[in-house]
Image: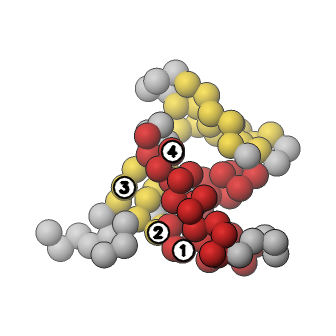
Amino acid sequence: MARRFQQSAGIEFAPLQDEVILFHSPSNKFCVLNRTSSFIWAQLKEPATSEEIVRRLEGSFSEVKASEVTADVDSTLQQMLELDLIVRVEADNSH
């Protein structure tokens, strides 16, 4: 079963040119996301898997190849999890 991720509740954000600034109020920390990380963040407004994000990146950025960005997307998701910016969402609610 594929793991889905979604933005954590209570994260404030503000666009800044090609970047996004996130504010995590529980920890009182700011985080600046580059263009690619900002795209990933935006995709997590609704639950999404790493694979879905990679496909969307590939469709939105002509220079992106899935084989090259899969590890980057996984790494970005892991960092966002560690910073409590996103949460894991159960894809199957049957348990």
**Numbered circles on residues, count:** 4
Q: Quadrant of the C terminus?
A: bottom left
Residue indicated by mark 1 = 52
Q: Which residue in the rendered view is the most extreme toward the left?
A: 95
- Comparing 90 with 66, the one in front is 66
Amino acid type, mark 3: Arg
- Give x and y (percent) for residue 92: 26, 73
Which residue shows up at 45% across the image and 64% down it?
A: 47
Q: Are marks 1 and 2 in contact (CB under 8 Å)?
A: yes
- The circle on residue 88 is 3
Amino acid type, mark 1: Glu
Q: Secondary structure at mark 1?
A: helix
Q: Are marks 2 and 3 in contact (CB under 8 Å)?
A: no
Residue indicated by mark 2 = 49
The mark nearer the N terminus, 2 or 4, is 2
Between the C-alphas of marks 4 and 3, the distance is: 13 Å
Q: Secondary structure at mark 4?
A: helix
Q: Is residue 83 visible?
A: yes
Which residue shows up at 68% across the image and 51% down it?
A: 38
Amino acid type, mark 4: Gln
Q: Is residue 89 left or right of residue 25?
A: left
Look at discs 2 and 4 and give the one toward the viewer.
Answer: 4
Look at discs 4 and 1 and give the one toward the viewer.
Answer: 4
Residue indicated by mark 4 = 79
Q: Is residue 83 left or right of residue 58?
A: left
Look at discs 4 and 3 and give the one toward the viewer.
Answer: 4
